[in-house]
Image (spheres, rainbow, N blue to C red):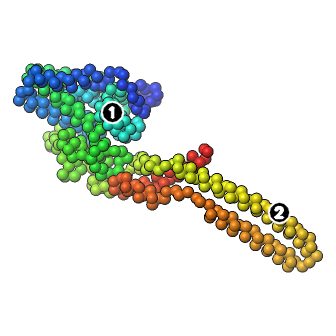
Amino acid sequence: MSTLSPASNPSRIDQPVHHDHDDTVYPGKALFIGVHLACFAAIWTGVTSTSIILAITLYVARMFGVTAGYHRYFSHRSFKTSRVMQFLLAMLAQSSAQKGALWWAGHHRHHHRYSDTEHDVHSPRHEGFWYAHLGWIFAPQWDKTDYEAVPDLSAYPELVFLNKYEHIPTVLLIALCAWIDGWTGLVVGFCWSTVATWHGTFMINSLAHVHGNQRYVTGDDSRNNWWLALITLGEGWHNNHHAYQRSTRQGFRWYEIDITYYVLKAMSWARLVWDLGAPPPEVVRNERPVGKAVLEKVARQLAETFNVEQLVADARRAQGAAQQQFADMRHQAEDRLAEMKHHAEDRLAEMKHQAEDRLSEARHHAEERVAHMRAQVQQAMAGVSWPHFPTRDEMRAKAAAMLPASPSLDAIAARAHELLAERVAQRLATA
């Protein structure tokens, strides 16, 4: 596959979010709204025990397809499997009507690359809760598959085919539901479970970046939420996942229920999957320093919490006062030096015929006067009211208040101090 620049490739998605909501895009306004409205058709079709069992079964099965297939396998390749099982995982995942596996993986990798920045596909921090939850799916810039982001997956023709004809698994499932329980199976079995699966998935984009606890410094708003983990079969341990994305297991502690991982573990006993990723012990214990990219991102966020414009304004006021004082001192010094020069010339003229020791005495007297003037300059500098600039200790205290415990807090504070100083210096230099 040829490499294109982001500007020349219309499928690239590394650009800031734009709020264009005019076009009909994934999952299609008509389809998305239609399936939601179709749920109310149960008023006429009724609800049977068969349709309820079908809906629950399809929710669990397709949520597993999303979590194990779309997310942990296609997006993160956190375990290995055969080509046949890979295709079956894609079929199961795509039966949830969340587009193709390559599309899903490309967008999710983009999310991790720019998580909670202005470039994120869905970020409550920048775009608000409802845009992060479902508004972004109607924005046209997210509709295309970014094949450059998934070269490992696009090497498989069957996955490319399935990605292109994304609705094949969904149509087959619709037919199966209708065959099992007629219109009730279609409305309750398919529509109810589809809407539930959609919003279960979307809550990881929205709620898992708003509600819950942070155990690890990840440079974003990802959180651990136990009840989200229950309804999404383990995806609610979102801060864990952002801390170590290569892990198949997202519930790092024994008490963190991760149903998707349990199923994959059982599948590994049958050799259906293998090489399941696990977090290193030092990651679980939160003893590993954060990576360079995360450190830089978090340090920049910390530096941005300080008012640069106020620091620059204070520095300019102090600079102006210091310049005025130094100007006054310079004029005084010039006058005194001129006086000393004139006096020294007179004395030297008188002492030409006198002994060398008298000349040495005059030089010593002049040196004393110069030393006295230097002391006056230093005293004037000490009298200037220089503005307060946040210290590294203050940066460290603020980092400790903002972030989870981490062995990298000192390094983050030191880097934030450097970044803040650089920003203030740049602003002063451009004045």
Report the residue marked by disc 2. 338
Q: CA distance from mark 1 to mark 2?
A: 73 Å
* 124 shown above or below 405: above
Residue at the far right: name it: 353
At x 39%, y 29%, the residue is 19
Report the disc number at residue 131.
Answer: 1
Q: Earlier in the sequence, mark 1 or mark 2?
A: 1
On-image quarter of the N terminus:
top left
Q: Work out which quarter of the rendered image holds the C terminus and state it.
A: top right
Q: Residue furthest left?
A: 49
Say what secondary structure mark 2 lies in: helix
Q: Residue at x 32, y 21 (%)?
A: 24
x and y, in percent, of residue 425 in the image: 57, 50
In the rendered image, the vertical position of residue 74 relative to residue 227, given as above or below: above
Q: Amino acid at mark 1?
A: Tyr
| 336, 294: nearer the viewer | 336
